[in-house]
Image (spheres, rainbow, N blue to C red):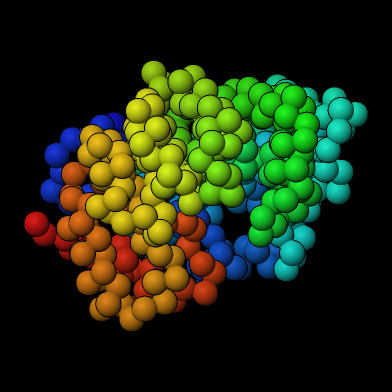
Amino acid sequence: MIKNDLFLRALKGETVDRPPVWMMRQAGRYLPEFMELRKKYDFFTRCRTPELASEITVQPIRRYGMDAAILFSDILVVPQAMNVEVEMKPNFGPYLPNPIRDRKSLDQVIVPDVHEELGYVIEAITATKEKLNDEVPLIGFAGSPWTILCYMVQGQGSKNFDKAKEFCFTQPVLAHELLTKITLTTIAYLKAKVKAGVNAVQIFDSWGGMLSPTDYQEFSWQYINQIIEALKDEIPVIAFGKGCWFALDVMAKSNASALGVDWTCSARNARYLTGGNITLQGNFDPSRLLSPPAEIKKMVHQMINEFGKDKYIVNLGHGILPNIPLENAQAFIEAVKEYKV
């Protein structure tokens, strides 16, 4: 049994004394202990070495005592497993030298045996569970099929993912074939994580907000929903679409246990759009962690009051930034732990 099960209770919609708190990207780049490891090992070495990945996962828990840990990994290990080369270039970000843009390149993309290709992630879960010693739940994650397609087709990060959209709109048959391959791989990957012992999973649709509401349903949501349907009986699933407030009403009708909300959607609108029945997670602007600690605490308490303490998980509206002072991250976590109705 997990000793601190506040996060899992919030996912079930149970009444709690205070909401749970964790931060997207909490395992990583703002922590000095992470920086030490970064000097010694390159990005994918950190992802692929279970001892390193598990150590990075528990670093923020040791320091701040969040109510959940999220496994250190990357959404782009999935395309790597699917026979697509991915590099992580310093000061540039992800780079895929052979983007998928036609039938020939699509045929090279495989639906892999996830245990064979991503076994190191499964081993990292085992190592992390041992380190956590059932203190807090462990979250596993994957990118949404659309977000993975964005990188596979664009070949790198982008402000508008124009090439990815062009591919979908000019070659929809190929696009749906690629999305299906990614979906099948992701389902198998997340099921393997569940078997290895994660307590919840989150699907990150980082680039969902690039699509119009109609295109979102066709090229993103229907595939996320397939993943939710495949996992709903095994584990709680959180769906987070950045910039996707327009789809919250549809998402709320799914079997997701919770929906992530970014900072562009108010608590009131998020509750209204989702009908008030589903657990919500978010939505503190990560840049607001640059405010003075006292102000952060005030804003966090206000945010909890607006969302309500039940059916709510305190989080950022996207990943924590690398330049956040340690005491500011601490103020964010402490504010939630000190919360009184």
Quadrant of res 180: top right
Q: Is residue 80 visible?
A: no
User: Which residue corresponds to the image point at 43% horizontal and 39% vertical from the top-left?
Assistant: 247
Quadrant of res 174: top right
Q: In this view, does 130 lie above or below 103?
A: below
Q: Which residue lies furthest to the left in this view?
A: 341
Position in image of residue 196 (x %, y %): 50, 28
Quadrant of res 198: top left
User: Which residue corresponds to the image point at 25% horizontal and 60% vertical from the top-left?
Assistant: 303
Horizontally, is 68 left or right of 196 in the view? left
Q: Is residue 234 above or below residue 263?
A: above
User: Which residue corresponds to the image point at 41% horizontal and 54% vertical from the top-left?
Assistant: 262
Quadrant where the image shows the C terminus: bottom left
Q: Can residue 225 be seen in this view?
A: yes
Q: In this view, does 329 lie above or below 201?
A: below
Quadrant where the image shows the N terminus: top left
Position in image of residue 265 (x %, y %): 36, 55
* Figure label count: 0
- Residue nearer the viewer, 213 or 159: 213
Horizontally, is 185 left or right of 233 in the view? right
- Residue nearer the viewer, 83 or 218: 218
- Residue nearer the viewer, 240 or 125: 240
- Residue nearer the viewer, 124 or 69: 69
Q: Residue furthest right?
A: 104
User: Which residue corresponds to the image point at 46% horizontal and 20% vertical from the top-left?
Assistant: 229
Position in image of residue 168 (x %, y %): 71, 36
